[in-house]
Amino acid sequence: MKRRSHLFLILAALALLALPTVPALAGAGLWTALGPDGGQVTALAVAPSDPDVVYAGTWTAGVFRSTDGGETWTFAGRGLGTSYVHAIATDPARPDTVYASTTRGGVFKSIDGGATWAHVWDGGTPGGVTPVFALALDHRRPGVVYAGTNFGVFRSTDGGVTWERRGNLSAGVSSLAVDSPGGWLFAGVNSMGVFKSGDQGKTWIPAGNGLPTSGAIQSLAIDPERPRTLLAATHLGIYRTHDRGRTWNPVVGALAAEVSAVAFQDGGRAYAAFRERGVYRSGNRGFTWERSIASLRDSLFLALAAGPVAVYTGDVNFSGSRGLVRSLDAGATWEPSMRGLSNLGIRPIAADPSNPMRLYVGGFGLYQSTDRGATWTRVDFGLRPEPSAIHDILIDPARPARVYVSANDGPLLRSDDGGVTWERLNGGSVPLYLNDLAVDPRAPEALWGTGSDGLGGGFFHSADGGETWQRVGGLPTEAFFTLYTAVDPRDPRVVYLGAAQNVDGVTEPRLFRSADGGMTWERRDTGLADGNVWDIAFDAADPSILYALTSGVYRSTDAGLTWTLLPARGRLFTSIATAPAGPGTPAVLCAARWDIVSPSAVMCSTDRGETWTALRRGLDTYSPTELEVDPADPRRLYLGTLERGLMTYTLP
């Protein structure tokens, strides 16, 4: 198994559901997302002219779109990149015209329902882009768009073609709302409350008497039937005004805690998403409130939107236990609304060599599929008191029902029934944190593992199925990080260890080889450059050929004594895999390329790395994490990503 735990944790800090049946050749010549469904939803919008059209902005994958009121979702973020979506606004008359603001800065616009996006504004800052935290459209004036930034409010009157700053608000604007019938524009200003304008932002007057004088107004909502009534989401709870902002009062029945979003629905119904305390609802225009969704541990309710039929809320929960949900009965009950919304960060992948239909993937949670990715089940509920990042998944090839899982909060989990039940192993007397795992073929219960204990990074061996571990000697410990291990398929005594070491503030790649099962080691990294050794792979057709990844792809034909940099273009490669192509034919060599500036690709070669072809079609990801070959079908590739879950591609 190939794991890059340190890279995953860095990228992730930036990151029980069914999918439609996957055809036998899903992903043939095209990268296809397999799920699991779910992920972190940060913005929501229901199209005013068609309540069945709903847009969901996510933490890293851009935008998804539903045309059936949240029953199913399709990816609609091509062109947005790896971006946290702050806000979404839809045209009042054209549901396919939508605006989105992201961490990349400025405003994006789509006129085809998210099939394509154009960057229409950089945020108004010379020499760079500025995050836009709020968007609002004037329903009486087609083409009028307002944007809230750290430098005030800006307006476009031509659908985003040109922009101008409006008024003298100089502080950060975190929320906007337009009372189109009355002609009033409201802005939530950081640590200053609410301001309003009756002349499209040309002049502003205070409208926040009674609101907290510190913190941000995260969201504003106007009652569509009584537009003098507004709700404000503050860090001290929900506030309400009935006189268009002259006076505000805290509401009854809700907590004095941080609120992320508020929304009105027809009939005087209102909803509020508390950041960590759940969702509340009101049936009397916000006078009194009751809890609608109880808070979950580690839940962050950030997004909320209400249409005439359904209300939606997004739970940014790293455990993957919720995601996007909707209510069709005014918040009395809630149901998952994530079919096709694949935005979970996936890193380790394990395919059962004895059963090609069984897959395991891990991120912040462990998932299993028994139909090659068509449907998924969460299989680690109850294992820990809180969600954990999964580092590695290892299926015992001699006993496929035995599965090992390493995570960031302990040494090892083991299941002997294919993930139905789990045992947490203590790893011995010294606290041990494991990253990458490998089977030691010399004994039925023997395992290798990279990780760290009280002495620092190292290489460890278990002879009893992971119950206890011993540090393998002969390796450095100070400022030493072990990342990946590989066992020679021809001789199980030959083990390679990929690592990194900090030398005078510079990270240098380290690769070690043992010819005696880990008793002694020698360095084999001459010619490797640039940081960490992220991966090691043996050529599937000729195991005497070895590949390694740092920021590039390297090849060795002398057991790692020397390395040659191969001409694979890219800034950083995160995973490598080789697949047999036929008798007497060089193996197909593939490497996953990560590039935060442009969409990533999987680069493949049929001549051992001398020339490469980029497999990009359908790959809507910037952060691939793990590349594996289906053990039953070498043409099928599996790719873990931080934005789109698990993806698959079938080679021609």
Image: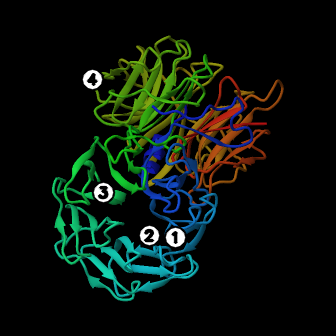
Per the image, the residue denoted by label 2 is 135
Horizontal and vertical percent position of residue 438: 51, 25
Label whose residue precedes the other's in the sequence (4 or 3): 3
Spatial CA distance of label 3 from label 2 is 20 Å
Per the image, the residue denoted by label 4 is 429
* Category of crowding for the residue at label 2, using alpha-carbon neighbours closer than 10 angstroms: few (below 14), some (14–19), many (at least 20): many
Amino acid carrying label 4: it is: Ser
Does the CB distance between marks 2 and 1 fall below 8 Å? Answer: yes
Spatial CA distance of label 2 from label 4 is 55 Å
**Residue 12 drawn above or below residue 578:** below
The local secondary structure at tag 3 comes to: strand
Per the image, the residue denoted by label 1 is 107
The local secondary structure at tag 2 comes to: strand
Amino acid carrying label 3: it is: Ala
Horizontal and vertical percent position of residue 591: 65, 42
* Category of crowding for the residue at label 1, using alpha-carbon neighbours closer than 10 angstroms: few (below 14), some (14–19), many (at least 20): many
Amino acid carrying label 1: it is: Val
The local secondary structure at tag 4 comes to: loop
